[in-house]
Amino acid sequence: MTEKKTATLSLEDGSTFTGFSFGARRSTLGEVVFNTAMTGYPESLTDPSYSGQILVLTFPLVGNYGVPPMETEGGLPRFFESDRIHISALVISDYSFEYSHWNAVKSLDLWLAENNVPGIYGVDTRQVTKIIRERGVMLGGVTLEGEPLPTAFDDPNRRNLVAEVSCRQVETYGDGPLKVALVDCGCKYNIIRCLVRRGATVMRVPWDYDFTALDYDGVMISNGPGDPQMCGATVANIRKAIEIGRPIFGICMGNQLLSLAAGATTYKLKYGHRSHNQPVLMAGTDKAFITSQNHGYAVDPSKLGGEWEPSFVNLNDGTNEGIRHRTKPFFSAQFHPEATSGPVDTEFLFDKFIEEIKAWKR
């Protein structure tokens, strides 16, 4: 690292936290959120769901295992969830200057700098998290030494973040017998990996692409950042797919978009769900699962059409965690069954989706 320079994290409630700059030496604005995971920062930083967000990592030892190589397997990076870092800035407590891991090829500092993403360390991240948990998710900024603190903040949710992170053209992965149209709203690569491992050819399409014109056996609607109300074109295409009747599986943003197509509404959560340890209950059972989540919006299932019902509920706050059709092969999950670095308790939902496709084809 170069010579130390201070930087300041400012929150819109007036709170400020001063630490040291690392990564790209620049100032930025965004929505301040946190993540409780002890590992997996390469995956979190490359998750498109964090686009426009200043990510606060609560675990104090970050950077100690460096960054793995950008090597590919099956056309996708093996160790990342997209081809670049998506967060606006990174906030951590204690930066490890000496990384040590058999798979590391560079430091977190260098990786951030290469992606033009600023970071700040030496901040009491647990205090920042307490403020967010008490007052709700808020806007903020990271300001480099010598520059004025922001007097106004930028709300990334006013932009169509899905359009910013979605692919620009149709891309194909795998060569299996089952053809899945993957609507890319900010798709994590592990969704593609999970499908390809199960014998699917995945046709990844832009968020507003009319995938119903494709020759497909099932539809996967991916995760993504921001306000689902921005994705009217996607909702319209999902409604067409519902009429066609082939299996549909939505994840995270995909849950919200499928719910909108089914007649429900969405709303902004005060806190959001940002952790690797959210407990959810499968509706109608006593089965609970530990899940990874990152979203700021939720579904109000009270306005679902009569043929739909909730499938999962959050055990912390009672919010919706998924829906399903009562008779047809349409279902969704607000959490991440494909989560890396875990947990993988709910990856069986991919098996369910594949079985629904096979049953439809018979």
Image (cartoon, helix red, strand yellow):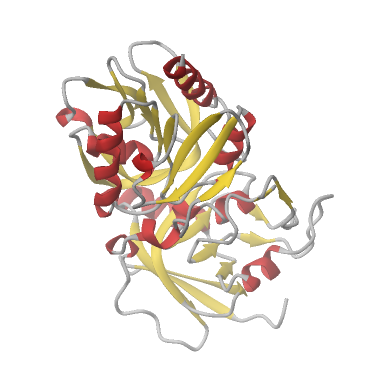
- How many numbered marks have been drawn onto this rendered protein structure? 0
Which quadrant of the rendered structure holds the N terminus? Answer: bottom right
Percent position of residue 304, x then y: 18, 28
Quarter of the rendering containing residue 324: top left
For residue 147, side relative to residue 46 (left or right): left
Vertical relation: 145 (above or below) 58: below
Between residues 83 and 43, which one lies in front from this camera angle? 83
Percent position of residue 19, x then y: 56, 71
Between residues 55 and 5, which one lies in front from this camera angle? 55
Residue at horizontal 34%, vertical 17%? 283
The reply to whether residue 276 is in sight is yes
For residue 20, side relative to residue 183 (left or right): right
For residue 97, side relative to residue 151 (left or right): right
Residue at horizontal 25%, vertical 21%? 309
Residue at horizontal 50%, vertical 57%? 56
Question: Which residue of the protein is positioned furthest toward the top in this rendering?
Answer: 285
Vertical relation: 127 (above or below) 154: above
For residue 83, side relative to residue 349 (left or right): right
Vertical relation: 326 (above or below) 276: above
Percent position of residue 73, x then y: 72, 46
Between residues 144 and 126, which one lies in front from this camera angle? 144
Question: Which residue of the protein is positioned furthest toward the bottom in this rendering?
Answer: 146
Residue at horizontal 48%, vertical 23%? 289
Quarter of the rendering containing residue 274: top left
Percent position of residue 116, x then y: 57, 74
Vertical relation: 225 (above or below) 13: above
Quarter of the rendering containing residue 117: bottom right
The reply to whether residue 292 is in sight is no
